């Protein structure tokens, strides 16, 4: 009697791992699919008037690995973009350092010394990037680049089509605090005589209290994606059958981030498998039919 045929169904997970330690970087379980294409070419011996090849030998092979995750974790930034993010497990609400964008007077000792969280108003912080513009020697207006989080705390809205959030200019006073109502942050005047240049700008980022977050700047000259291993497991079948592929050594670069209306984001990451001398191959494939199903 012939044995039962083996079949694959679905995907359970893909886990990239560190090749030196064997430890996993993390787990991609919310994933649309993964493909490992082991393809090659045949090198033909052709010549003369004859229409067919005289001989044929193996050519080069390629191991192309494609993942389609629907999740975006810190380890994916490190493995596929070459830079480990700065992760925060919990945050009571914060703003980044005010940095001059145009000119030098807004974020300065004679302008705004710093931007801080207003004590007791952390829940009013609205996620996003903000720009402060000088409109007089001691006055500023504030702009937000998005209103996606404006319903947090007290509802807010843009004042005009320029995306301004201040109904009127705010006065900056030497060594004194100016509160930005309903946004959870405040401006501290510099310790010197306030002297702003109209039209100059500075920017910062605000985030509300959170359970976890990360940030990273991509594209540095020293950023390099690491070689990694990848362990792929198909979805366990109802009869208990299991199937896995362990790709010993591969390299990927790039992490597409797709944002479409009313759709979950799905990336497509392409990697290439390399020969691993220590393992004596490119991958191992395992299949299991257990004695008893689940």
Image (cartoon, rainbow, N blue to C red):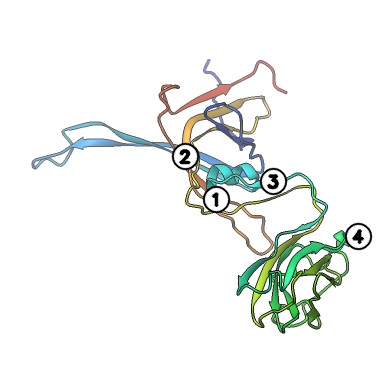
Distance (Cα) linking label 2 and label 3: 24 Å
Percent position (x, y) of residue 267? 58, 51
- Which mark sits nearer the N-terminus, 4 or 1? 4
What residue does disc 2 label?
A: 251
- Judged by depth in the image, the label closer to the viewer, 3 or 4, is 4
Q: Secondary structure at mark 1?
A: loop
Percent position (x, y) of residue 141? 74, 79
What residue does disc 3 label?
A: 87
Query: Circles 2 and 1: CB distance less than 8 Å?
Result: no
The local crowd at label 2, few if under 14, some if 14 to 19, many if 20 or more residues have their Cα within 10 Å, is: some
Distance (Cα) linking label 3 and label 4: 25 Å
Distance (Cα) linking label 1 and label 3: 18 Å
What residue does disc 1 label?
A: 255
Residue shown at the point (65%, 30%) measured from the top left: 236
* Residue occupying the far right of the picture: 120
Distance (Cα) linking label 2 and label 4: 48 Å
What residue does disc 4 label?
A: 120
Q: Secondary structure at mark 2?
A: strand
* Residue occupying the far front of the picture: 192
Residue shown at the point (74%, 79%) measured from the top left: 140
**Is the residue 202 above or below the residue 19 in the image?**
below
Percent position (x, y) of residue 275? 40, 30
Quadrant containing the C terminus in the rendered view: top right
Front position in the image: 103 or 161: 103
- Judged by depth in the image, the label closer to the viewer, 1 or 3, is 3
Front position in the image: 192 or 176: 192
**Is the residue 75 above or below the residue 168 in the image?**
above
Residue shown at the point (66%, 43%) measured from the top left: 30
């Amino acid at each position: 009697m012939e044995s039962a045929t083996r079949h694959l169904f679905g995907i359970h997970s893909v886990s990239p791992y560190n090749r030196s330690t064997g430890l996993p970087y993390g787990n991609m379980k919310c994933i649309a699919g993964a493909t490992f294409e082991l393809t090659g070419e045949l090198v033909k011996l052709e010549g003369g008037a004859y229409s067919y090849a005289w001989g044929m030998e193996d050519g080069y092979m390629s191991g192309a690995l494609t993942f389609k995750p629907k999740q975006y974790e810190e380890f994916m930034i490190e493995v596929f973009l070459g830079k480990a993010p700065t992760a925060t497990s919990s945050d009571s609400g914060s703003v980044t350092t005010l940095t001059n964008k145009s000119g030098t007077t807004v974020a300065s000792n004679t302008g705004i010394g710093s931007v801080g969280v207003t004590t007791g108003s952390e829940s009013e912080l609205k996620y996003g990037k903000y720009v402060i513009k000088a409109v007089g020697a001691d006055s500023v207006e504030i702009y937000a680049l998005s209103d996606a989080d404006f319903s947090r705390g007290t509802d807010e809205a843009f004042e005009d089509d320029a995306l301004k959030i201040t109904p009127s200019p705010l006065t900056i006073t030497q060594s004194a605090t100016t509160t930005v109502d309903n946004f959870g942050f405040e401006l501290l005047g510099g310790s010197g005589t306030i002297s702003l240049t109209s039209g100059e700008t500075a920017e910062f980022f605000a985030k509300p209290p959170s359970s976890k977050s990360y940030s990273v700047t991509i594209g540095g000259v020293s950023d390099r994606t690491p070689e990694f291993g990848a362990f792929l497991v198909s979805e366990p079948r109802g009869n208990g059958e299991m199937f896995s592929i362990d790709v010993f050594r591969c390299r990927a670069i790039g992490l597409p981030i797709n944002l479409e209306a009313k759709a979950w984001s799905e990336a497509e990451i392409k990697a290439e498998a390399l020969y691993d001398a220590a393992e004596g191959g490119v991958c191992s494939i395992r299949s299991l039919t257990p004695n008893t199903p689940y």
